[in-house]
Image: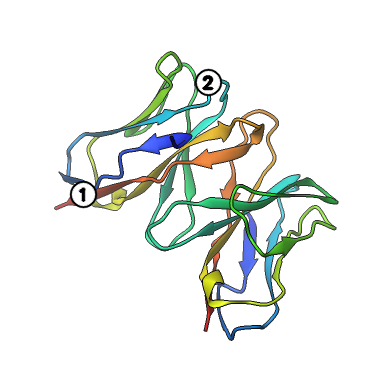
Amino acid sequence: RKEVEQDPGPFNVPEGATVAFNCTYSNSASQSFFWYRQDCRKEPKLLMSVYSSGNEDGRFTAQLNRASQYISLLIRDSKLSDSATYLCVANGEDSSYKLIFGSGTRLLVRP
Amino acid sequence: EADIYQTPRYLVIGTGKKITLECSQTMGHDKMYWYQQDPGMELHLIHYSYGVNSTEKGDLSSESTVSRIRTEHFPLTLESARPSHTSQYLCASSGGDYYNEQFFGPGTRLTVL
């Protein structure tokens, strides 16, 4: 079983739609969680950290459910520019400094 | 915007050559990382460092080596490149004590002929 699992997608949605991604993590001791965005053939870029209380940044909302060990990302009012791969990330079992990246969920926003 | 740099951005080289991929950051981060990623595939950690003179192998076995003589510099070396080393190599750094978000460089796309 992978330490961080995501639905690979692709999620194909029209502009303006709301889309949600979930991911699960296996290490119950993980403390740090993030969502990264990666465009094709580019480096991953930090989208947002995920806090226990949940957090929102504009159209993006991240939630953490420790009991079920899953993390979610909600994107409202999708834009064409949101098309990318979204990586779910948790810190590893043996270190808080090593991050475990999920395989990513691909989002395609169509006109 | 994170200040982490990688050179070269693209490298095409013949089998058997020795190569060094450079990574530098100006944020004073103590932790640095090297990842390998093939197109459309997931990131694999190949090396990391928690500070000067500290280096560790990552989760994916790699024939490359790294060094950390200065805080800002974390080069990766392949003594004898092979076609199987063809991939994208991404360097990252982090400086937090708790929320250890990592910031990535633009990557080096390596092709070994």
Q: Residue at x 63, y 62 (%)?
A: B5
Q: Amino acid at mark 1?
A: Val
Q: Quadrant of residue A95?
A: top right
Q: Element under label 1?
A: strand
In this rendering, the label closer to the viewer, 2 or 1: 2
Q: Amino acid at mark 2?
A: Ser
Q: Which residue is mark 1?
A: A109
Pointer 2 or 1: first along the chain:
2
The answer to the question of whether label 2 and label 1 lie on touching residues, with beta carbons closer than 8 A, is no
Q: Which residue is mark 2?
A: A28
Label at residue A81: none
State whether residue B1 appears in this view: no
Q: CA distance from mark 2 to mark 1?
A: 33 Å
Q: Is residue A27 left or right of residue A6?
A: right
Chain letter behind tag 1: A
User: Is residue A71 shown above or below A81?
Assistant: above
Q: Nearer the viewer, residue B79 or A80?
A: B79
Chain letter behind tag 2: A
Q: Residue at x 50, y 52 (%)?
A: B43
State whether residue B53 appears in this view: yes
Q: What percent of the width, then of the height, locates residue B71?
A: 80, 52
Q: What percent of the width, then of the height, locates residue A21?
A: 30, 34
Q: How many marks?
A: 2
